[in-house]
Amino acid sequence: MKNFSSLLILILLACSFQANAQEKLIDRVVATVGSGIILQSDVDMQYSQYLANGGTPSDDFKCTALQQLIMTKLLSQQAVLDSVEVSESEVDDQLNARMREMTRRAGGKERLEGFLKRSLLQYKEEMRPVLSEQIKAEKFQNTIISKITVTPQEVKKYFEGLNQDSLPKFNTEVEIGEVVIYPELTKEEKNVFRAKAEGYRQQILDGTDFGTVARFYSEDPGSAVQGGELGFAPRENYVKEFSAMAFRLKEGEISPVFETEYGFHFLQVLERRGEEVNARHILVTTKPTTASLDRIKGKIDSIYDKIEGGKIPFSSAATLYSDNKETKFNGGMVINPQSPSRSTLIPVDLLEKEVFMAIDSLKEGQLSRPYQFQDPRTGKSGYKISYLKKRIPPHEANLEQDFAKIQEAAQEDKTRRSLSEWFEKKTKNTFVHINPEFATCDELQMWITPTSNNLAASKED
């Protein structure tokens, strides 16, 4: 179903990184919100971010950017009044995560610094107070959203209020289950990958820069572009083997090579701060051999025969034998990754190609033969059995088949209206003035009131 809450999306979109820098002499105030101001450079940085992410040049986006900034100001100011607190570690975590993503998108640290026209260290310090304000705004907004629920009667009323002549149409949807088996490598097979990690570690011990080796050879795409750096994080952010090693080392010390479910790592602790550590690492992922895949083929064929022969229900087989932790404790059923309510109904156009081909010819209640696959998120290869529980043909939206989706849309609509009401009420009690240059923006009309602009004009006089 189409998104019914464009306003909510604007608020939830990361306000990203507004810069105070730009040329100081040409900077100016474009909006006043209560006791706070929004600068032209804030809007310009949002626009630069939009273009860097692939957006097409558009003056309309500057209107959208200013609207987002005004919303953030109003929410953060109320958050202060309600004593909403933001810790330094929260700011650091989000700042580091966003910097890693920006570096990845830019294609490296040097290119990002060229785009920002400043060093990343300088940029991070400039962004710290901005991001703190944004987190406060998000926290306060969540206190509003968390109280909003819809009853079945409200869902029905919402649906009946839609234009019945132009209801959304849904593509074929399926409910599918899976049993996934990944290969286990022998010690000899693993040693090939361990030796590669040991070789990279020795390069660093011999004097090669850790960050350079990580950028060239680490197989962790999220941190490799950052020279392997992960940013400050607590123990629970890592798998136990990684956490145990990171919190045992002294600053500057390089660990031995060790194994986790992701492969072979070694790491260096850059800094300790209380119960958080900033480490960098190099990862060599283990990959299945032909022999290891042959070994699990026999195992999954046996599981298939048990299910098909009625010796064990599919859900029990998934719980007992599947290696996919995300589905095995759900009876093997796959969750729709785009559903806020964690629905098991999945549009077929969201299925991976191998899964679609495996279930396309099945009838409800049937199993596919075991087939080899590769997880597109992790790159891990293995064997899978797919189970088709239900197939819903293309149809027009209706309450009987689509209650969960309509409920999500009704919740979204109620949330949008509640937030709009909050902003409308807030603006009646908060001075908001917008530079006349933005007065023609449709998105900003709710903020532009004769009272506020007249008051501002009198102050200027």
Image: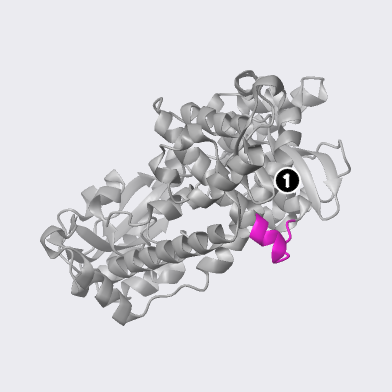
Q: What percent of the width, then of the height, locates residue 337?
A: 39, 56
Q: Secondary structure at mark 1?
A: helix
Instruction: Please say if 36 is above or below 234.
Output: above
Outermost right residue:
250
Q: Nearer the viewer, residue 285 or 339?
A: 339
Quarter of the rendering occupied by the C terminus: top right
Q: Is residue 229 above or below residue 314?
A: above
Q: Which residue is painted at 84% across and 41% down in the image?
A: 271
Task: Say which quarter of the image contains residue 343.
Answer: bottom left
Position above or below: 43 against 92: above
Q: Position of residue 209 (x, y in %)?
A: 76, 22
**Looking at the image, is 81 positioned above or below residue 229?**
below
Q: Is residue 15 left or right of residue 328?
A: right
Residue at 82% over, 20% down: 207
Q: Which residue lies under the disc numbered 1?
A: 92
The magenta segment is 77-86
Residue type at mark 1: give it.
Asp
Q: Is residue 218 visible?
A: no
In this view of the protein, can residue 76 be seen by the observer?
yes
Quarter assignment of residue 416: bottom left
* Quarter of the image where the N terminus is located: bottom left
Image x and y of residue 291, in percent: 44, 42
From the top left corner, tell me how far across and down residue 119 is, in percent: 72, 23
